[in-house]
Each structure stands twice: as C-alpha cells, then as structure tokens.
Image (cartoon, grey):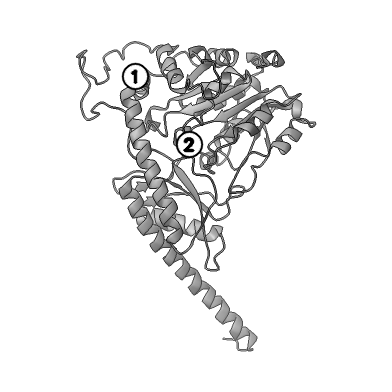
C-alpha cells in the first residue's frame, strides 16, 4: 500500500553512528530488572514471565543425546558457529503469523529480523534511523521503559505523547498527528507503540494505528511492540500487516506466552528493505544454536500445543483475579485492559483513594515479608497508586490473594495509628495543652 511514499527510509551511514558508552543513571529501574530472585520460596509476579514454564513438548529433565531418534535437542554441534541467517526459524515465525486476518498477502523470511529479545530490535532501529544528538523518537507513556533507555544510550531525543486516560489507555491520535506535523516532525524518525501496553495491558485499536500510518507528510517508521499479543483475542496480531505498510515494524518475543525468557529470542516483522537493514547491522552470529533449536521446537506444533494449553491456564487465573481482587478491602479499580498476562490495579488508602504511599508499602511488605513480588507502577503517567501484577499459577494466585489481603489490612492499620497520633496531637495543641 503506497510503498512509493517512503523513498526516504534509509540507514544512517556508519560514520555518523556514535553511541554513548555510559549507561544513564538509574537505567535498571526502567527495565524488568528485579532485586528479588527465585530462591525456591518467593513468588515472582513482577516481570510478566510465564510461571507455567517453557512451551516445549520434550522432557526437559533428560540430558540431550546425539541419538537422531531422541526428540531432545542435540548440543554436540556447539563447536560450530550458528546459522547467521536463521531462515528455518524465520519461516516458523511466518507460519505462526500468516493468519490472513489483516491482509491476503503472505510474509516470508525476508520480512523478519531475529534478535536477542525485542531489546536488540529496539536498539537496532534507533541505530539504523536516528542521527545521535539530532534525531528523536516518539513514545506514549505509560509504556515499556526500554524505548527511553535505548534512546538515552544512543543520544537520541524523546518526544512524549501520553496515552489517553485509563482505563482505555489508547493512543492520542490527534496529539500524535499534531506532533508529526509540528516543528519537531522532521527529526522524529520512529514512533514506539506498545500493544498490548506495558503496564496498561490495553490493546491499541487497529483503526487508530491506521490513522498514524496514513499521516500525509511524516516519513518515519512506526514500531508496534506486541510482546504480549498471544494473550489478546485471536487475530489481534498485526505482524502480517507489514506486507501492506513498508514503514511498519511489529516486534514480538518468545519470552511471554511461550515461557522462554531465558533464551532471549525476539523478532521484528517488517518490509524487506528495513529487515535487510537490520540484518546487515546485527552481529553475524547474534542467535546461538541452542536458542535457535529451542525456539524452533516451541514454534512447531508440539510446542504450540503446550503454549496454548499454558495460555488457557493463565487466562483462567487472570479471570480469577478479576473476580476475586475487588472483594478485598483496599483494592481499587483495574486501570488497564485484560489483553495480557498481567493486571494493573489501584491500592487505596484508608480514605478509599488511590495512593502511592499505600501502594509502595504494600509492594514492600509483600516482597520483603511475604515473599510475593509484584511491580510498583505508581509513578508512571496515569497509574497513581497502581501495582502491576503478573498472573501466576493457580497455587501462586491463591497465595497472592491471601497475602495481599493480609498486607493491605496491615498497611491500613499502620496508617490509621499514624493518623491517630497526628489527630491527637492536633487536638491537644488546639486545647492549649503542651506536653
């Protein structure tokens, strides 16, 4: 569709690419890094991982062998460098996303870049299209923090157009259109949109994205991050839509629904020219042989069956949280959507209002005293008093519901005592009695 509109899509010459070697202060706080680790007793509901495990049909307790009849992965070829092109893996990704729900066209391996998680694609796109110290990207907070971190690392500026208010958390099309028509438009080379959003869990409407792609004068690239897309309704992924829009990039990962965060495998679906740029920019052997083999097994029918079964379990527990959490005193509104494997929910103070102090105390008490780790998101735009809670297993959700009810009672009791002392002091002072 209108491919001639984008002749300006090109890579920045290597001589103009200057990267900042020093990571920005506090960069870890914007990523999925956690101070709390799995010690055998902690419940980790903070990083949106799949607690049901990897989507592999093999017996992972066995040691792989060289027997050709053994379904386990053969590690005996590790003395050889991995395939730099990953054509077979890319074809499996195409097979998964060629649903023809959004286009009659078919995407091929020429439409795909595979990297070390989605983060490699985020960074590579910046290095492809942005001149350090000059160009900018547009982001829509609240959103995934790695877009901003990568921009800082690459000395690329930020233009922020906040999402519409909760609970929709949709993109503000008029505001984006205005930004892409204003004085900064020529230097805005990329737009990063997360759908389903993180931390919002809301799916971005296709028609709104369409309006951004149809901007009459802006000539940049729209990047759609679909890390959580497999938890959304069937047919939600727009990966195949890149066959219609040469300036669209759709990023995905095997870290979430596929339960393979440990192998670090992400993919970017896009037009062949952009895919070629990304593939020429990457390190020759960025995907290891074990990563490729494990990812391929997950994307074949046996692995897909495991993924779908685990996804149904997660959705069941997500529905359970949606039903049970509002019954707990101190739990407020759900502030985002339900198209992901996490929920964004308010913590209320003793007056029944969403409150960051209460939310932070609940987060700290849960993690430090109860071994249940969630994510505090109260400082992000439109997320006052919010915790982001990853959906765990049935046992983990049962324990979480018990612990959060107890912790909320404890936090409210502590706040009541503090407020009581303050009120008593005010009363004494008002009566002219000084101790």
Q: How crowded is mark 1: few (under 14 residues within 10 Å), some or many (20 or more)?
A: some
* Distance between the alpha carbons at the discs numbered 2 and 1: 26 Å
Reply above or below: 151 against 162.
above
The quarter of the picture where residue 425 lies is bottom right
Q: Earlier in the sequence, mark 2 or mark 1?
A: 2
Residue 369 in view (yes/no)? no
Number of numbered discs overlaid on the protein picture: 2
Relative to residue 267, is residue 261 drawn left or right? left
State the image coordinates of residue 326 (x, y, percent, origin top left): 46, 58
Query: What is the quadrant of the N terminus in the image?
Result: top right
State the image coordinates of residue 385 (x, y, percent, origin top left): 55, 56
Residue designated by label 2 = 232
Relative to residue 397, is residue 376 drawn left or right? right
Q: Residues within 10 Å of mark 2 (few under 14, many from 20)?
A: many
Residue designated by label 1 = 293
The quarter of the picture where residue 5 lies is top right
**Front residue of this view, candidates 159 and 29:** 159
**Mark 2: which secondary structure?**
loop
**Front residue of this view, candidates 389 and 101:** 101
**Mark 1: which secondary structure?**
helix
Question: What residue sits 48% from the left and 36% below the top?
Answer: 232
State the image coordinates of residue 246 (x, y, percent, origin top left): 62, 18
Question: What residue sits 57% from the left and 20% below the top?
Answer: 242
The quarter of the picture where residue 181 lies is top right
């Amino acid at each position: 569709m209108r491919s001639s509109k984008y002749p300006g899509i090109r890579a920045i010459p290597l001589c103009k690419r200057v990267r900042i070697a020093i990571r920005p202060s506090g960069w870890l706080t914007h990523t999925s890094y956690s101070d709390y680790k799995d010690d055998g007793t902690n419940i980790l509901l903070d990083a949106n991982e799949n607690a049901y495990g990897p989507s592999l049909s093999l017996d992972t307790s066995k040691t792989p062998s060289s027997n050709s009849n053994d379904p386990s992965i053969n590690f005996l070829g590790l003395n050889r460098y991995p395939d730099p092109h990953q054509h077979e893996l890319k074809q499996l990704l195409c097979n998964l996303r060629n649903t023809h729900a959004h286009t009659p066209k078919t995407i091929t391996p020429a439409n795909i870049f595979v990297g070390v998680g989605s983060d490699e694609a985020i960074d590579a796109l910046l290095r492809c299209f942005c001149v350090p110290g000059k160009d900018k990207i547009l982001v829509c907070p609240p959103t995934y923090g790695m877009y901003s971190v990568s921009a800082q690392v690459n000395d690329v500026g930020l233009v922020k157009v906040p999402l519409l208010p909760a609970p929709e958390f949709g993109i503000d099309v008029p505001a984006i259109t205005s930004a892409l028509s204003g004085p900064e438009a020529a230097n805005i080379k990329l737009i990063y949109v997360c759908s389903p959003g993180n931390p919002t869990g809301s799916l971005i409407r296709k028609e709104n994205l369409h309006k951004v792609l149809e901007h009459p004068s802006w000539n940049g690239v729209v990047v759609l991050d679909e890390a959580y897309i497999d938890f959304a309704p069937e047919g939600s992924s727009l990966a195949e839509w890149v066959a219609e829009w040469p300036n669209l990039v759709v990023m995905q990962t095997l870290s979430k629904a596929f339960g393979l965060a440990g192998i670090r495998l992400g993919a970017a679906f896009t037009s062949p020219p952009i895919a070629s740029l990304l593939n020429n920019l990457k390190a020759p052997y960025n995907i290891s042989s074990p990563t490729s083999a494990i990812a391929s097994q997950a994307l074949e029918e046996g692995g897909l069956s495991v993924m779908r079964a685990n996804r149904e379990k997660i959705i069941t527990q997500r529905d359970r949280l949606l039903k049970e959490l509002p019954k707990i005193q101190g739990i407020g509104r759900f502030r985002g959507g339900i198209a992901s494997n996490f929920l964004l929910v308010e913590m209320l103070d003793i007056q029944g209002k969403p409150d960051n102090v209460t939310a932070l105390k609940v987060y700290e008490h849960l993690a430090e005293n109860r071994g249940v780790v969630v994510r505090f998101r109260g400082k992000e735009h439109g997320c006052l008093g919010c915790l982001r809670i990853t959906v765990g297993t049935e046992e983990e959700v049962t324990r979480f519901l018990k612990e959060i009810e107890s912790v909320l009672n404890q936090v409210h009791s502590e706040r009541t005592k503090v407020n009581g002392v303050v009120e008593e002091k005010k009363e004494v002072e008002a009566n002219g009695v000084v101790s």
